[in-house]
Amino acid sequence: MIKDTKEYIQSCAVGFRKSLRKFFKYKNKDRKYTTKKILVGGGYGYGNVGDEAQCSATLKLLSERYPDYQIVNLTPNVEYSKKQHPLYNHDFASRVLLFNQGRESNGYDFKRTLLVRIVFLLKSFHILFNALLVRADLPTFFINARVAKFLYELKEASLFYFCGGGYLTGSTLSRFWDGILICRLAHLFKTPVVMSGQTIGIWENNFNKAYARWGFKHVQLISVRDEEFSLKDLKEINLFGERYFATHDDALHCEKTQKQLIDKKDYVTLNFHYWGMKGREKRIYLAKINKIVNLILEKTEADIVFIPMFSADKDSFDEYIKKYPNTRVQCFEYNYDFREIRRVIADSKMCITMKHHPIIFAMGELVPVISLAFSKYYMHKNLGALAQYGQEEYCIDLESENYLQDFIILFDKIINNSQEIKEIIEKNIKILDERKDKFLKMVDEIIVG
């Protein structure tokens, strides 16, 4: 009896020592993939048609390229994503599982108090500690079953794939910090991470720079969707080289409906919205938009079609139509299906937009664009996107005193040189497609390796 007890204690001690070694030292050769699974994360799931277009194109691409792998889309709204992308598997994103986004104990809303950010960071390091326990096959410490399941899923995954978007920036702080945590968790588990078509950077302060460096330095591959700004910001945190390069936005080749939706021969699509604006600023901005609308109507016979990319966009359109009614101005009404809005843009003569994804849809359809920007965030995204297609001059700063004169010059240039512009866009799309193919071949090597 004593001998059996002694042997049992010795066996437990050996097991404990092995667990401790695994806790503190985890080598690549220890990494075993029990399932062929790719987890996909991104900024979608909120009803923004541009983000859903990226998500759809990404899920389709991965499913076709890796048919033997289970593709799981991580989303903050599973029911919504199931309706938008019914052919794919969906589960809750880390922001819901780890930080209770959308619940009463929401730890993801950074706009409330500074304390929320501090708690977010503390909770992140508590989750990292538990990841070490999961890695060593030890019991977890003060986390619920949902969090533990997420950690085990990430541990067993073959790849974590960040779908393209503009959510890994200092201007979208909670998503940015959440992305950093995912990267560090994956690194603990030796799960490869790649980022596709990102707008990344705008760090805003030294803490975010250091935090980004700590989080992103182990990402195997980062592709961005602009030629200069994102790569420059990555270089600021000492991330540069052959693993960091520009490709196109993931939504460039997304689907569109085949049915014509606007019963007009000539029209111009226009998007604007009030993101981050307040009372007086809204009124000034709306007056500027009205001057642009009037100029288009005076110079051409084309009508104006407002294109909402998110339900809140319609608030700005409704306010405009109420204040400046015109029979040649209308708002496109639809159920926020990216396939429909892409078709509307495809059939337009020109697209004028403040948001990023109308640019991408228009470029994919060889439709000339003028971008309207009013902040560093939009200049980063929109100017960067236009530059990829040789259209960087078609970006106007609405905060400039000369915005209207600049618009007139660019508008006339498009009217007189539309065919040449389309040829330039088409040439650049081919270059970007080659880069995307390079990116995907590198992803192939990461998964096989």
Image (spheres, rainbow, N blue to C red):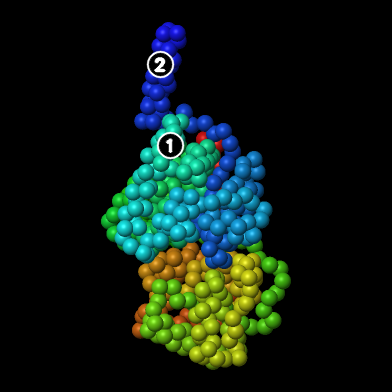
In the rendered view, would you say 194 is above or below 395?
above
334 on left or right of 97:
right
The answer for how far apart the CA atoms under marks 1 and 2 are is 22 Å
Q: Position of residue 331 (x, y in %)?
A: 59, 81
For the image, the number of numbered tags is 2
Badge 2, how many Cα within 10 Å: few under 14, some, many 20+?
A: few
Q: Position of residue 389 (x, y in %)?
A: 51, 65
In the image, what residue occupies the spot 37% across and 61% down? 110
Residue beneath disc 1 = 140
Residue beneath disc 2 = 9
Instruction: Choose top left, top right, bottom left or bottom right for residue 188.
Output: top left
Tag of residue 83? none
Secondary structure, mark 2, is helix
Specify whether residue 294 is in view.
Answer: no
In the rendered view, would you say 98 is above or below 31?
below
Comes first in the chain, label 1 or label 2: 2
In the image, what residue occupies the spot 65% across and 43% down? 67
Badge 2 amino acid:
Ile
Badge 1, how many Cα within 10 Å: few under 14, some, many 20+?
A: some
> Which quadrant does the N terminus fall into?
top left
Secondary structure, mark 1, is loop
Badge 1 amino acid:
Thr
Specify whether residue 204 is in view.
Answer: yes
In the image, what residue occupies the spot 61% across and 78% down? 332
Q: Position of residue 327 (x, y in %)?
A: 60, 91
In the rendered view, would you say 309 is above or below 96?
below
